Image (cartoon, rainbow, N blue to C red):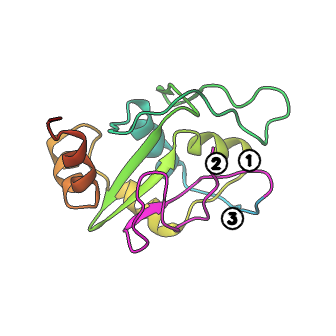
Amino acid sequence: MAHYYDLSVCEYVASEPNSRCLAVGWLEPEHEFARGDVSPEFFELLCQLLAKPWSFVATAGVHRCGFCRFSGGGSASFKGHHISGVGNGMLFIPSGSAIYVSPTSIAHYIDAHGYCPPAEFQTAVMECPEMRSLAYMRALLATPARQWIQKTHEPVA
């Protein structure tokens, strides 16, 4: 998996340097990261969004957690929200004209390794419409994701 510092441009999905596509939670052992507490309400909502994340990006394979010595991270569940595909997908959180992009392993990093995402990401998660809802899609289309979605749906000549 690629490493990105929090709130840097997530070049995994956006190549423009001024993009409002911001990386959150792309952790690797060689790099320091913010640690601290998050609210149970934030974590539950994050897990709910991760249960069936909408994505327009295909990933190849699974990224095992570089911090876990033996298990590699595996699956995760919290209050009935089962996160399938930990380490093999991305979560897109729209927020105004920005979009936050996280690996699906972000909940594992928070729970098992004490990672504390930036406050603005936590706010965006708390305000995020229900995954796959019309409100979510409208919020997503107000971000740079609009161009990516259009590119993936252009007819091939």
Do callouts 2 and 1 mark residues in contact (Cβ within 8 Å)? yes
The amino acid on which the numbered mark 3 sits, given as a three-letter code, is Ala
Cα–Cα gap, marks 3 and 2: 10 Å
Q: Earlier in the sequence, mark 1 or mark 3?
A: 3
Label 1 element class: helix
Q: Which mark is residue 113?
A: 1
Task: Classify the position of the C terminus by image quarter.
Answer: top left
Residue numbers of the magenta segment: 1-30
User: Residue 57 at what x, y percent from top left?
Assistant: 38, 39
Cα–Cα gap, marks 1 and 3: 10 Å
Q: Circle 3 is placed at which residue position?
A: 34
User: Residue 67 at what x, y percent from top left?
Assistant: 79, 42
User: Residue 108 at what x, y percent from top left?
Assistant: 63, 39
Asked if residue 118 lies left or right of residue 126, the reply is right
The amino acid on which the numbered mark 2 sits, given as a three-letter code, is Ile
Q: Residue at x 46, y 45 (%)?
A: 46
Q: Residue at x 38, y 56 (%)?
A: 126
The amino acid on which the numbered mark 1 sits, given as a three-letter code, is His
Q: Circle 2 is placed at which residue position?
A: 110
Q: Is residue 106 above or below residue 81?
A: below
